[in-house]
Image: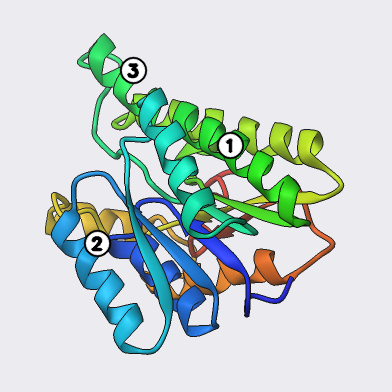
């Protein structure tokens, strides 16, 4: 698929990795839907950055866990764009929780945000893509969904569910819509990470260094531009997903 002239929605694109993906798609002449839940100021800044560079973008606010918000989001996309070719499911919740201290509320929050919402966003996106031709869906997952981080138990399980959804969506939406996933490693640390947590994350990679947001952006673009891959996961994690003992 040629990015130029396409229409894309990037969830959670006000900040961090989602913002970088949205900016690059706009730089390549895609019309970009910038989605945010609560980061209104950052979302407007992303919008202004794109428009000041001559790109085309629109803002969309929605709590993706909320059914009516999702319906409103796609009604607005249909009204403003009339079509959709690309979805990047980036919005996510990342919070610690062990088997001993995780609460039902914390479990539900992360399962809803990281697995349920991306599935139903993809469902709605696929319906709109079906009206405008072939489509691409890229889910942002995590190596934690495969190895399970015991200090982030609900988060890991939610990302494992998203990996399963990625495969199921690829099967269900073929042949017209390709669905793939990118699993970033330590490329942009959470704000609450300590120096020791950052050091530990880097040490667990095979390359013994952190990556860059652009590494993730290029991986997303690879799936969008390649027309013969579906159901795959591309790890952009310096080899962190490979177990210590084979």
Q: Is 178 placed left or right of 191 in the picture?
A: right
Sooner in the amino-acid sequence: mark 3 or mark 2: 2
Taking the spot 36% from the left edge, 24% from the top edge, the residue there is: 154
Per the image, label 2 sits on a secondary structure element best described as helix
Taking the spot 55% from the left edge, 37% from the top edge, the residue there is: 146
Residue 70: x and y in percent read 43, 34
Sooner in the amino-acid sequence: mark 3 or mark 1: 3
Above-or-below relation of 194 to 116: below
Placement of the C terminus among the 4 image quadrants? top right
Sooner in the amino-acid sequence: mark 2 or mark 1: 2
Taking the spot 45% from the left edge, 40% from the top edge, the residue there is: 144
Q: Please name whichever residue, 145 or 114, is drawn nearer the observer in this view of the structure.
A: 114
Residue 92: x and y in percent read 36, 42
Q: Is 195 placed left or right of 97 in the picture?
A: left
Taking the spot 80% from the left edge, 36% from the top edge, the residue there is: 171
Farthest residue, direction front:
79
Q: Please name whichever residue, 17 or 175, is drawn nearer the observer in this view of the structure.
A: 175
CA separation, marks 3 and 2? 26 Å
Residue 218: x and y in percent read 55, 74
Categorize mark 1 by other alpha carbons within 10 Å: few (<14), some (14-19), many (20+): some
* Residue under numbered circle 1: 124
* Residue under numbered circle 2: 43
Cβ–Cβ under 8 Å for marks 2 and 1: no
Q: Can residue 208 be seen here?
A: no
* Residue under numbered circle 3: 108
CA separation, marks 2 and 1? 22 Å
How many labels, in total?
3
Residue 227: x and y in percent read 81, 65
**Protein image colouring:** rainbow
């Amino acid at each position: 698929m040629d990015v130029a002239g396409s229409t894309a929605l990037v969830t959670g694109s006000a900040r961090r990795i989602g913002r970088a993906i949205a900016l690059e798609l706009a730089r390549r002449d895609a019309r970009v839907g910038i989605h945010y839940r609560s980061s209104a100021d950052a979302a407007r800044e992303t919008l202004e950055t794109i428009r000041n560079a001559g790109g085309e973008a629109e803002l969309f606010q929605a709590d993706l866990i909320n059914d009516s918000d999702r319906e409103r989001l796609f009604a607005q996309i249909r009204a403003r764009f009339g079509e959709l070719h690309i979805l990047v499911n980036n919005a996510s919740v990342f919070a610690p929780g062990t088997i001993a201290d995780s609460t039902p509320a914390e479990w539900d929050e992360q399962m809803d945000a990281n697995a349920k919402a991306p599935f139903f966003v993809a469902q709605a996106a696929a319906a709109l893509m079906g009206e405008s031709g072939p489509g691409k869906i890229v889910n942002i997952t995590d190596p934690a969904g495969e190895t399970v981080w015991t200090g982030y138990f609900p988060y890991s399980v939610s990302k494992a569910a998203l990996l399963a959804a990625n495969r199921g969506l690829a099967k269900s939406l073929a042949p017209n819509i390709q669905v793939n996933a990118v699993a970033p490693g330590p490329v942009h640390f959470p704000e609450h990470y300590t120096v020791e947590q950052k050091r530990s994350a880097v040490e667990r990679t095979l390359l013994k260094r952190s990556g860059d947001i652009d590494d993730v952006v290029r991986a997303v673009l690879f799936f969008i531009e390649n027309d013969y891959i579906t159901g795959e996961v591309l790890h952009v994690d310096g080899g962190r997903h490979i177990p210590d003992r084979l």
